[in-house]
Amino acid sequence: MTPEAQRLKAEIRAKEKELEKVQNECQHKKQVIKMDDKNSAMWECTNCEKRLSFPTPKEMQKWMNQ
């Protein structure tokens, strides 16, 4: 691996840790159901974008009817 690639990977790891810290400190006060690239629906915090939990069938039905 080139020094440039190593530097970039280190920066990515550092930013991922920074994001994880922000998401862990967030109170997740506002959440919405969002689909990911694999068509999996999950509750996601609108502030920190952390994927939190799977919606119940009742929550999914309500979301689909909006």
Image (tube, grey):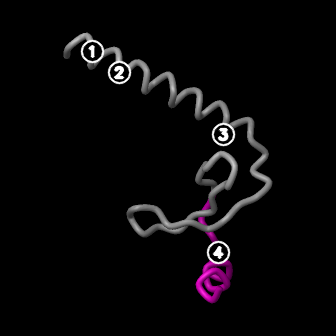
Precedes in sequence: disc 4 or disc 3: 3
As measured in the structure, the alpha-carbon distance from the residue carrying label 2 to the one carrying label 4 is: 40 Å
Q: Quadrant of residue 33?
A: bottom right
Precedes in sequence: disc 1 or disc 3: 1
Image quadrant holding the C terminus, namely bottom right
Precedes in sequence: disc 4 or disc 1: 1
Residue designated by label 1: 4
Mark 4: give few (<14), some (14-19) or many (20+) Cα within 10 Å: few
As measured in the structure, the alpha-carbon distance from the residue carrying label 2 to the one carrying label 3 is: 22 Å
Secondary structure under badge 4?
A: loop
- Identify residue type, mark 3: Gln
* Residue 8 marker: 2
Are the residues flagged by discs 2 and 4 in contact, CB closer than 8 Å?
no
* Residue 23 marker: 3
Precedes in sequence: disc 2 or disc 4: 2
Q: Quadrant of residue 42?
A: bottom right
Q: Position of residue 39 (x, y in %)?
A: 42, 69
Look at the picture and state if 10 lies above or below 44.
above
Q: Position of residue 51 (x, y in %)?
A: 59, 53
Highlighted range, magenta: 53-66
As measured in the structure, the alpha-carbon distance from the residue carrying label 1 to the one carrying label 3 is: 29 Å
Closer to the camera, 59 or 66? Answer: 66
Mark 1: give few (<14), some (14-19) or many (20+) Cα within 10 Å: few
Of badges 4 and 1, nearer the viewer stands 1
Residue at 59% across, 27% down: 18
Of badges 1 and 3, nearer the viewer stands 1
Q: Is residue 1 magenta?
A: no
Q: Position of residue 16 (x, y in %)?
A: 51, 31
Secondary structure under badge 2?
A: helix
Locate residue 41 relative to residue 22 in the image: left or right. Answer: left
